[in-house]
Image (tube, helix red, strand yellow):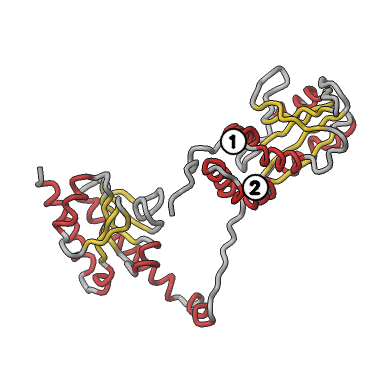
């Protein structure tokens, strides 16, 4: 499946904070959802979005909200410190930089909230460092969880008239919500799952792929193990690749096409992509417009499977290298 458009682009704490702010600014309904998430009972006062990522002598809060009364008079402020799973809890935060900022704010309503992933590694440190200290100065401290906020946003996603907002919420869901896997298995499948057959098949398949690749790497050091997504740009299997030519297995193809072991090529390697059809005439199948493959599944059962596959690959690469 294609990745969300923000995959590997929006990662850091600051970027996630800005993404959340963009949601607030872009859509009134989302602004209401997020405001009510932090302030489920705003007794007689109004929460106005204020600012984000602006540094002053008290630090750089991720998100700030102004709190005003019905006459639009400022009566307080809330600071939201956004954390991702790898965000540290800094010494300056522990030493009270946000506390000092809130104490300098006009009005009596003062809040310091932490928006964190569930099971955030510094959650207990937040409670130990902030809760009692802030309450002594009449500052309300609270912890809120990303997965709950994201679930609320996801439930409203269908009503949004914006593909971009839908992508943003989808990215937050990928990053912070839990993807529990449901297994709908019959008894025969359950029994099979707990035999040694499956791990033995994968073990031998890995051994076959490694044996082919080890020989290829001796003769061409440009062969590399696919460490990013496995089976090329499409699946998530186990492969070795040379430029855009991949050899290995791909779980998507295995499941959907019964193709257990494949050689595949990507359109980015133009000459190889063009030659692939001619060289493997009649055997080539398309994954999509940019990837195609030949199925080697039946060759696994050959006694000389490693030698046979090496010859197939070398014949193709030799022809490729001789083509100008």
Query: Disc 1 vs disc 2: which is toward the camera?
Result: 2
| Residue at (56% x, 63% y) in the render | 181
148 in relation to 22, above or below: below
In the visual, does 135 lie left or right of 10? Answer: right
| Residue at (20% x, 70% y) in the render | 304
Residue 92 percent location from the top left of the image:
71, 26
Q: Quadrant of the N terminus?
A: bottom left
173 in relation to 128, above or below: below
Kindly report the distance in space between the C-alpha atoms of the residues bearing marks 1 and 2.
Answer: 13 Å
Q: Quadrant of residue 38?
A: top right
Give the mark, 1 or 2, whose residue is nearer the N terminus.
1
Reading the image, the residue beneath label 2 is 153
| Residue at (59% x, 36% y) in the render | 19
Q: Quadrant of residue 144?
A: top right
- Disc 1 is placed on an element classified as helix
Count of labels in the image? 2
The 10 Å Cα crowd at callout 1, few under 14, some 14 to 19, many 20 or more, is some
46 in relation to 242, above or below: above
In the visual, does 131 lie left or right of 13? Answer: right
Residue 318 percent location from the top left of the image:
13, 51
In front of the other: 321 or 27? 27
In front of the other: 29 or 193? 29
In the visual, does 287 lie left or right of 271? Answer: right
The 10 Å Cα crowd at callout 2, few under 14, some 14 to 19, many 20 or more, is some
Residue 19, numbered circle = 1
In front of the other: 248 or 152? 152
Residue 297, numbered circle = none
- Disc 2 is placed on an element classified as helix
Judged from this view, the residue extending furthest toward the bottom is 188
């Amino acid at each position: 499946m294609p990745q969300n458009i923000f995959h590997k682009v929006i990662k850091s704490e600051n970027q996630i904070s800005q993404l959340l702010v963009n949601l607030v600014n872009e859509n009134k309904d989302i602004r209401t959802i997020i405001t009510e998430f932090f302030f489920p009972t705003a007794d007689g006062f109004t929460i106005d979005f204020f600012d984000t990522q602006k540094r002053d002598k008290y630090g750089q809060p991720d998100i700030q909200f102004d709190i005003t009364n019905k006459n639009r008079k400022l009566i307080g402020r809330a600071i939201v410190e956004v954390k991702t799973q790898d965000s540290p809890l800094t010494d300056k935060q522990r030493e009270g930089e946000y506390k000092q900022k809130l104490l300098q704010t006009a009005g009596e309503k003062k809040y310091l909230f932490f928006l964190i992933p569930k099971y955030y590694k510094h959650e207990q440190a937040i409670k130990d460092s902030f809760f009692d200290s802030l309450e002594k100065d009449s500052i309300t401290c609270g912890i809120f969880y990303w997965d709950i906020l994201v679930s609320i946003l996801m439930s409203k996603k269908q009503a949004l008239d914006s593909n971009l907002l839908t992508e943003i919420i989808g990215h937050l869901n990928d990053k912070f919500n839990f993807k529990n896997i449901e297994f709908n298995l019959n008894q025969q499948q359950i029994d099979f799952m707990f035999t040694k057959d499956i791990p033995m098949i994968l073990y031998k398949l890995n051994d076959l792929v490694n044996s082919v690749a080890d020989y290829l790497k001796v003769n061409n050091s440009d062969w590399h193990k696919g460490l990013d997504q496995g089976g090329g740009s499409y699946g998530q299997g186990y492969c070795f690749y040379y430029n855009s030519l991949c050899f290995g297995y791909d779980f998507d193809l295995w499941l959907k096409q019964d193709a257990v072991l494949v050689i595949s090529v990507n359109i980015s390697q133009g000459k190889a992509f063009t030659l692939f059809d001619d060289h493997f005439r009649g055997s080539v199948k398309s994954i999509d417009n940019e990837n195609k493959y030949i199925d080697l599944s039946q060759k696994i059962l050959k006694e000389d499977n490693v030698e046979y596959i090496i010859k197939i690959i070398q014949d193709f690469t030799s022809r490729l290298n001789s083509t100008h």
